Image: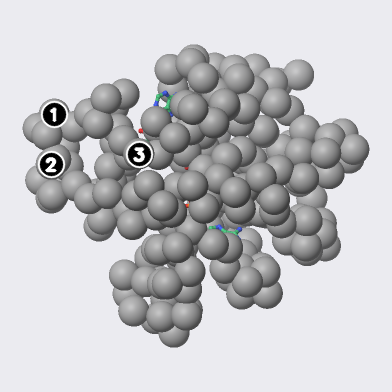
Amino acid sequence: MNLVFLGPPGAGKGTIATAMKEELSIPHISTGDLFRSAIKNETELGKKVKEILASGNLVPDEVTIEMVRERLAENDTENGYILDGFPRTIFQADALQSMADIDAVVNFDLETESVVKRLSGRRVCKSTGRTYHILYNPPKVEGIDDETGEQLIQRDDDKEDAILNRLEVYKKQTEPLIAYYSEKGLLKTVDASSAPEKVLELVLAVLKK
Ligand code: ADP
Ligand code: ADP
């Protein structure tokens, strides 16, 4: 199954995709993770996008689309994939139409107040990308990754100014995709406000319909 996860930053897309990739045995392709990995490895792409990610603005469409095109051409996508964080603009969605047959778009619905709480409490392990929340999903030892023992960090774009910018960017550039996919009959909206186990259940249920 070729899936797209849509929704505001912090709605829980990555958390559910991580749980679901095991359930469905398909890869979780997060454009944010791909960019962060390029930044960490100091590749040409990484150098180009570093400041953009820190500010919370979007990477130019052409650059993002090319990266996704290459990723979707890898062997592990044969039985499907979860695209998380792509597309984020109508232009990207049109490009995706020409590269892939999408079976469903899961729209993670969460009000802004909860989005801000989830983003501001998010902590990540830089080397593995594992995600925690200081209140909703704390590590066993405060500030330390459960498995690697590394210090957890707060992403630059999870700090207050960048959060506000990202929410504006989402409203202007990404939210129109809800109507776009609804018109195509692909949109499945899920209430993302419950605990992760419940949200996972809801997502699996709408996909079965
Ligand atoms: P979140 O899930 O918290 O919104 P992501 O990890 O998906 O964050 O994205 C982090 C950043 O990576 C975005 O703010 C943006 O700068 C860049 N990015 C990720 N996906 C895209 C995309 N599809 N188009 C443009 N920029 C993107
Ligand atoms: P996204 O990929 O949509 O940006 P994440 O999956 O990274 O969102 O989740 C954002 C933050 O909210 C993380 O700190 C995560 O631990 C937490 N979180 C995710 N899903 C839930 C949930 N259902 N309830 C409470 N907190 C959640």
Q: How far is the residue under mark 3 from the one under mark 1? A: 19 Å
What label sits on residue 144 in the rendered view?
A: 2
Q: Are marks 1 and 2 in contact (CB under 8 Å)?
A: yes
Q: Position of residue 79 (x, y in %)?
A: 63, 46
Judging from the image, what secondary structure is the residue with disc 3 in?
A: helix
10 Å crowding of disc 3: few (<14), some (14-19), many (20+): some
Q: Which mark is residue 140?
A: 1
Residue drawn where x is 32% and y is 53% of the image: 155
Hey, what amino acid is under mark 3?
Answer: Ser
Q: Classify mark 1: helix, strand or loop.
A: loop
Q: Residue at x 64, y 23 (%)?
A: 190
- Label 1 sits on what residue type? Lys
Residue 163 position in % (x across, y down): 45, 47
- Give the CA distance from mark 2 to mark 3: 17 Å
Find disc 3 in the rendering and name its residue. Answer: 120
Q: Relative to residue 86, is residue 21 depicted above or below?
A: above
Q: Which residue occupies 67% across, 33% down? A: 106
Q: Is residue 34 left or right of residue 111?
A: left
Q: 113 or 202: nearer the eye?
A: 113
- Labels 3 and 1: the sequence-earlier one: 3
Q: CA distance from mark 1 to mark 2?
A: 8 Å
Task: Please provide percent x and percent y for residue 100.
Answer: 76, 56
Quarter in which the N terminus is drawn: top right
Q: Earlier in the sequence, mark 2 or mark 3?
A: 3
Q: Is residue 145 above or below residue 72?
A: above
Q: Residues within 10 Å of mark 2 (few under 14, many from 20)?
A: some
Q: Quadrant of the C terminus?
A: top right
Q: Is residue 6 above or below residue 36?
A: above
